[in-house]
Amino acid sequence: MSDDLAARLREQGLRLTPQRELILRAVDELRHATPDEVLVHVRGQVSSVNASTVYRTLEVLEELGLVRHTHLSDRAPTYHSVHEHEHVHVVCRTCHTVLSYDPDLVAPVVAALAEDGFTMDVGHLAIFGTCADCAGS
């Protein structure tokens, strides 16, 4: 992970800092996390990291193609590592559980949009509804 991060940062004329490495590791460990959740996780290891560092670093990491974000609520974006397989996010509006599904789930939609020349970003897709537990099934 840090070799990939260091190489991509060097390509952009940036350097690998301990904060950048910690923030990328936090995204990997948390799997789906808002910037505030990343901040709490990182502060458990290094108290000197502040919120603006986390937000700026997440933007840089996304520009480098090391993390992606999606909107799983009306709050801040949620980040996840690109090292995870691409997946569709399914979010329960009641309990806020986030489940990951294979992109094949939306393959017919992807294909229909592709016929019109549109390339869908499946990893950014979030589908909202009610899970079986909250629906009483």
Image (spheres, rainbow, N blue to C red):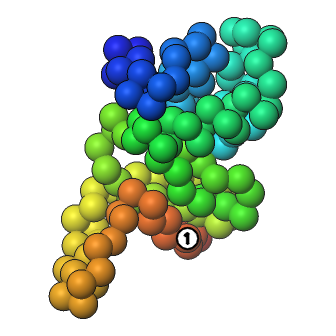
| Residue 26 locus on image (x, y percent) | 57, 24
Q: How many marks?
A: 1
In the rendered image, the vertical position of residue 112 relative to residue 25, given as above or below: below
- Disc 1 residue type? Phe
Q: Is residue 66 left or right of residue 43?
A: left
Q: Nearer the viewer, residue 88 or 35?
A: 35
**Residue at the location (75% across, 37% down)?**
36
Q: Secondary structure at mark 1?
A: strand
| Residue 72 locus on image (x, y percent) | 60, 59
**Residue at the location (81% across, 12% down)?**
48
**Residue at the location (29% across, 80% down)?**
118
Q: Nearer the viewer, residue 98 or 16?
A: 16
In this rendering, does residue 109 appear at all? no
| Residue 65 locus on image (x, y percent) | 40, 41
| Residue 45 locus on image (x, y percent) | 69, 9
| Dot 1 crowding, Cα within 10 Å, few <14, some 14–19, many 20+ | some
Q: Which residue is mark 1?
A: 128
**Residue at the location (79% across, 32% down)?**
51
In this rendering, does residue 99 appear at all? yes
Q: Nearer the viewer, residue 127 or 79?
A: 79
Q: Nearer the viewer, residue 56 or 115?
A: 56
- Quarter containing the N terminus: top left
In the rendered image, the vertical position of residue 52 relative to residue 48, given as above or below: below
Q: Is residue 23 left or right of residue 63?
A: right
Q: Is residue 104 left or right of residue 78?
A: left
